[in-house]
Image (spheres, helix red, strand yellow):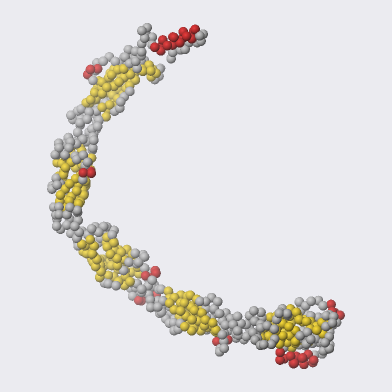
Amino acid sequence: MGWCCSGICGALALLALLCPLRERGCWGLNPSSGDVEKSPHSDPDPWGALHRHKRSWVWNQFFVLEEFTGNEPLYVGKLHSDVDKGDGKVKYVLSGEGSTSIFTIDENTGDIHATKRLDREAQAYYTLQAQAVDRVTNIPVEPRSEFVVKVQDINDNEPKFLDGPYLAGVPEMSPLGTMVVQVAATDADDPTYGNSARVVYSIIHGQPYFSVEPKTGVIRTALPNMDRETRDQYVLVIQAKDMVGQMGGLSGTTSVTVTLTDVNDNPPRFTHKNYQYTVPESLPVQSVVAKIRAADEDIGSNAEMDYRIMDGDGPGMFNITTDENTQDGVIILLKPLDFETKSSFFLRIEATNRNIDSNFLSAGPFSDTTSVRVTVDDVNEPPVFSTPLGKMVVSEDARVGTSIGRVSAHDPDTSNNAIRYSIDRNTDLERFFNVDALSGVISTAKPLDREANLIHNLTVFAIDSQDPTQIGKGIALITVQDINDNAPVFAIDYETILCENAMPGQVIQTVSAVDKDELLSGHRFYFALAAPVAGNLNFTLRDNKDNTASVLTKRGGFRRREQPVYRLPVLIVDSGSPALSSTNTLFVRVCDCDSDSVALSCGAVAYTATGLSTGALVAILGCIITLLGKTPCPVER
């Protein structure tokens, strides 16, 4: 079986006739055996073993031009078998890829046609199988053979930038030829056939600033020292053309947006060499006095700067910091201003770039200086006390009208107006004190009691006589000195118990005293029994000389039936000058106690006519009733 393709079919037919019919074929046969070289995919053919015919194969591959647009089916080639004697007994059958949808075969002549337009980029090869069969029996007259139809490429695809459009950046002031970005275009045509897929690059828009390497697509700067501050963005149009750029080639374009990134090539510069600001003298400390700014054409970290006060008068009065958001220099007040002391200040300030690029040091110092004058405006200020806190002392026995001390304030303004004084009565609700409106002398207005109020904290107003809205405030801290005007008393209300079984000389109570006064040397108390009972036969008192005293029994045999309670007057004397004393009564209760001197019952005992207590009579009566009822008698406890 043989193949013919288009115009060379006649030559192929002639070549087929020249091949010996039963020796070996021109193509597709094993030269050593003379048999048809079967495709590894050929089906086993039992008829091939029974009918071994040597055939003349003249072609094993057909070529079809893609995108053929003729009106008639495209002739691909011709199949012919040596068995075919031209008598119509042989029929040709085609199978494989596209054998019914794309390719057809004339079963009589073996002519193959393509019925559809082919696209190499969709499928470049078609593998088909051909076979000659007996027309009547459909029995193969020779084994099935395989051949390939290759779709021949034409330049029907333009280059495409699959990654475009591009965004790129390059530092400003870059040297000539600095690489910016590499672009790449792809062409779907056959790269192994002709120049259809061989692409070259050119720049359509973007000159003279940038260039592109024709073969690699690398874009480079074409001018040195491009300045971002003049122009920061360029849009390039890059073309890729196939056929090595020759006429008739197809092309595609893409855009490349190139942004010049900033470098620190501009120093900061103050727009003025002198600045002047005015602030009131009442401006609080840590307030902003002024904001100045050195202009820097750079951006981001390249525009960051630090400020400092180089010199000037008023050291320590001001400080300057950088506002990180605006890069302003913020001048801060560190100390209170006083127009009457100093009415203006002069400062020399320097601004320096924080991040300096050593590549541009030749451009000059990346710093600048300016002068700032701060003028202080006079403000009507409230009077000021010479001493904000005045400490005074007065005795608690001072008579009404006694002068304690004096407060003093002055008008800080140049007018030096007269001052009037008054007491803030919210700090002296009971009006213990007065202040002289003109002199500022503070005196007592009521008797004082240290024990009621030791310290008086007065707020004194100083009022500008010409502007009553201007009020200064001072503090007068008055301490009341103690005098010995309180007698000592028992420290607590004592509950003294005396057991009936107490022995003579037994301590039944230890007492102490307190005194509201506070003597500088401390208290010393003296104890004694008051004169009416000093010689009594029951108790005595011993001064322990440590501000305590002990009460002792003089005898034993105390009976609560005889006297349940004793009243013992105790005299206490302090060590003040003059000394004060008081008599305090100690109540001693007689109790029935156990062997450990723990009181069981105290107080008076009730008696009946027979001398028996009511409880005893009730117990006896209970026994009588019980005896009548023959039950045990209850026992009194």
Instruction: Give the quarter of the figure containing the C terminus.
Output: top left
Q: Name the side, left or right, on which 353 lies relative to 139.
A: left
211 in relation to 306, above or below: below
Which residue occupies the foreground of this view, 133 or 361?
133
Tell me if residue 259 can be seen: yes
Residue 480 as seen in the image, left or right of residue 254 = left
What residue lies at 66% left-to-right and 83% top-to-bottom? Answer: 117
Q: Nearer the viewer, residue 77 or 113?
A: 113
498 sits left or right of 636 in the view: left
Res 312 quadrant in image: bottom left
Query: What residue is at 78 percent from the left and 82 percent from the top?
Result: 93
Q: Position of residue 336 (x, y in %)?
A: 24, 57
Q: Point out residue 492 in the picture as x, y percentages from the top left corner.
A: 30, 27
Instruction: Identify which residue is drawn at 40% across, 78% down.
Output: 231
Q: Is residue 218 visible?
A: no
**Residue drawn at x 77%, y 91% as measured from the top left:** 13
